[in-house]
């Protein structure tokens, strides 16, 4: 099996997810982590009692087998999530967990799988009489592992006496610009909204394709064309004369259940997802968490770009945080109106 090819398919899946999120949030700021969702549902597919939902997850993730999913997971764990802050790289942290009803008859091999392969906490709990306590425990675990950025992932009544398992992932990222923006140059400038009006927001500028209403068309292409994202990432370093983007902060949460239903994952899945990102002169900080609650019941060759261009993000745009070595998309977001979150 070609692991890199399998991982590229996951980027295509990420764009499909983004398209479905955008369909209901077309005029909003949003941020979510395809990588976090992938980790949670991969554990669900590989876990005990996968059954019909495992087949649906395989189909959605465009994977031929559980072994292929596990190979992608192994690559993510060993390369993408490897801690590199000591060598000057970004800080990355990804953790997994499974909370499972203690009365269920479970083959011991699954405990070994989760603890030794997924490196997950494996907790036997009493959902039948202490569901609310378990919900609070999972939320505290998420908050701790996301540097206190993601709070109350699981809302009240999301965990009940009928809950059998909770598969959870928490992801934290913090990276610095290679050349930080100087705060002296940060000034209020106009950001152009799709309705033709403008709002004044702080723009960061570094001195060393301006269609304002094409986001939906772009994301349709990204979601419907296999390999689109990987084939449109420049292979050459792009020299910038002027680089100007707004400072912004986005917090976003949604029930991913309806999105998964739309893409064919229909059985026994209630999924909750939250993410946040903050971009400032120093760099980016982002976090995400996913809880999957189970109840009863090839790149194209491209010509070198012009030596220097201006990049001015003064209208709504889509952004990604992407790991370069494997091309894995960690976060996808849209900035529609930056003034919604003021610093």
Image (cartoon, rainbow, N blue to C red):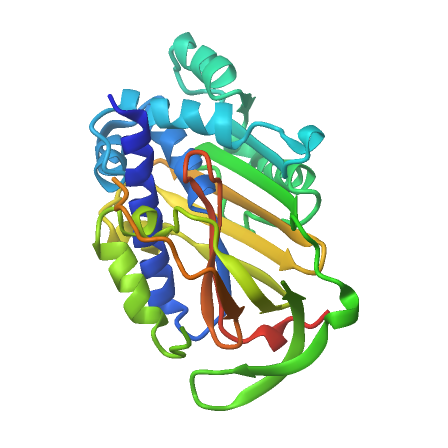
Residue 244: percent from left, percent from top: 59, 69
Residue 286: percent from left, percent from top: 60, 49
Res. 256 in view? yes
Q: Is residue 194 above or below residue 327?
A: below
The quarter in which the N terminus is drawn is top left
The quarter in which the C terminus is drawn is bottom right
Residue for point 33% across, 67% down = 23
Residue for point 69% across, 72% down = 342
Q: Residue furthest front?
A: 307
Q: Residue furthest right?
A: 184
Residue 308: percent from left, percent from top: 50, 63
Q: Is residue 46 above or below residue 333?
A: above
In front here: 141 or 161?
141
Residue for point 59% across, 37% down = 138
Residue for point 33% across, 51% down = 229
Q: Is residue 60 above or below residue 24?
A: above
């Amino acid at each position: 099996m070609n692991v890199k090819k399998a991982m590229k398919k996951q980027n295509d899946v990420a764009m499909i997810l983004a398209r479905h999120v955008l369909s209901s949030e077309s005029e909003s700021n949003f941020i979510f982590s395809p990588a976090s969702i992938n980790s949670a549902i991969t554990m669900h597919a590989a876990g005990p009692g996968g059954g019909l939902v495992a087949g649906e997850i395989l189909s959605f993730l465009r994977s031929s087998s559980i072994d292929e999913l596990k190979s992608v997971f192994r690559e993510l764990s060993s390369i993408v999530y490897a801690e590199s802050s000591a060598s000057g790289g970004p800080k990355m942290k990804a953790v997994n967990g499974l909370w499972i009803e203690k009365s269920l008859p479970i083959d011991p091999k699954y405990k070994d799988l989760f603890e030794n392969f997924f490196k997950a906490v494996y907790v036997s709990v009493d959902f039948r009489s202490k569901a609310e306590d378990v919900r609070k425990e999972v939320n505290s675990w998420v908050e701790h592992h996301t540097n206190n950025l993601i709070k109350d992932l699981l809302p009240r009544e999301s965990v009940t006496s009928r809950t059998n398992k909770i598969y959870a992932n928490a992801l934290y990222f913090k990276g610095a610009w290679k050349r930080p923006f100087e705060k002296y140059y940060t000034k209020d400038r106009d950001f152009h909204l799709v309705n033709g009006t403008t709002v004044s927001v702080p723009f960061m500028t570094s001195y060393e394709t301006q269609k304002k209403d094409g986001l939906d068309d772009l994301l349709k292409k990204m979601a419907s064309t296999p390999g689109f994202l990987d084939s449109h990432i420049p292979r050459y370093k792009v020299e910038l004369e002027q680089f100007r983007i707004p400072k912004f902060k986005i917090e976003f949460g949604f029930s991913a259940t309806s999105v998964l239903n739309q893409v064919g994952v229909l059985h026994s899945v209630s999924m909750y997802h939250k993410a946040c990102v903050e971009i400032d002169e120093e760099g980016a900080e982002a976090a995400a968490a996913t809880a999957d609650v189970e109840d009863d019941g090839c790149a194209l060759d491209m010509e070198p770009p012009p030596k220097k261009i201006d990049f001015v993000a003064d209208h709504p745009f889509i952004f990604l945080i992407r790991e370069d070595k494997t091309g894995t998309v960690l976060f996808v977001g849209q900035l529609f109106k930056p003034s919604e979150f003021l610093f």
